[in-house]
């Protein structure tokens, strides 16, 4: 696989080497030539940490850009076209971070590494390359998954 885009939780789980990261997703990340992280993930992580919804990231939140560089990852671009797609796409999912992540994946023609089955609602959407995750979605959120 040439490139993948990581959903916010997948990136954090890969940084912390957590078992929550699906083995097939981990393999896709390791085999990708380029691993992108959407810029909105930095916003999402810091906002959820500040509000107390994701205390587990406290040890890494101040070092996110450096940690991404150390992993060999790249911050994905976020263009005006991506922003317009995010806001205007016909998708019932309302989470603004997920919409930005989806638009980034579509415009960059990258599959998305994500545990979130909400992205499966984009199947058939022009340019959508799919979601990489092999296991069945969990019935409950992982304790390290940010609460919505």
Image: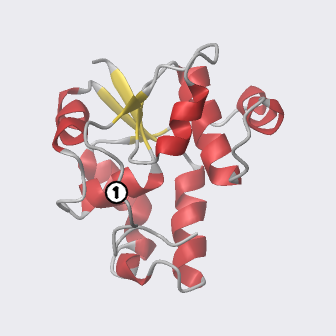
Residue 104 in the figure: left or right of residue 68: right
Residue placed furthest toward the front: 139
- Residues 59 and 139: in front is 139
x, y (%) of residue 41?
Answer: 53, 55
Residue found at x 35% / y 60%: 12
Q: Quadrant of residue 23?
A: top left
- Residues 143 and 15: in front is 143
Q: Quadrant of residue 125?
A: top right
Please, is residue 74 above or below residue 32 in the view?
A: below
Task: State the quadrant of the C terminus.
Answer: bottom right
x, y (%) of residue 83?
Answer: 76, 36
Please, is residue 97 above or below residue 135 in the view?
A: below
Residue found at x 17% / y 60%: 19
Task: State the quadrant of the N terminus.
Answer: top left
The 10 Å Cα crowd at callout 1, few under 14, some 14 to 19, many 20 or more, is: few
- Residues 12 and 22: in front is 22
Residue found at x 18% / y 27%: 31
The figure's colour scheme reads secondary structure
Please, is residue 61 above or below residue 93 in the view?
A: below
Please, is residue 61 above or below residue 32 in the view?
A: below
x, y (%) of residue 90?
Answer: 78, 29
Secondary structure of residue under mark 1: loop
Residue found at x 20% / y 42%: 26
Residue 106 in the figure: left or right of residue 62: right
Reading the image, the residue beneath label 1 is 138
Counting labels gives 1
């Amino acid at each position: 696989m040439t490139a993948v885009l990581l959903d916010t939780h997948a990136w954090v789980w890969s940084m912390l080497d957590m078992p929550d990261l699906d083995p097939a997703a981990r393999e896709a990340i390791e085999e990708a030539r380029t691993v992108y992280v959407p810029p909105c993930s930095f916003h999402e992580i810091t906002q959820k940490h500040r509000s107390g919804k994701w205390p587990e990231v406290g040890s890494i939140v101040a070092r996110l850009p450096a940690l991404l560089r150390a992993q060999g990852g790249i911050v994905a671009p976020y263009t005006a076209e991506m922003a317009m797609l995010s806001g205007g796409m016909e998708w019932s999912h309302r989470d603004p971070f997920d919409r930005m992540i989806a638009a980034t994946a579509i415009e960059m023609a990258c599959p998305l590494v994500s545990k979130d089955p909400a992205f499966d609602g984009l199947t058939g959407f022009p340019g959508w390359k799919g979601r990489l995750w092999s296991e069945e979605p969990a019935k409950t959120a992982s304790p390290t998954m940010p609460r919505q």
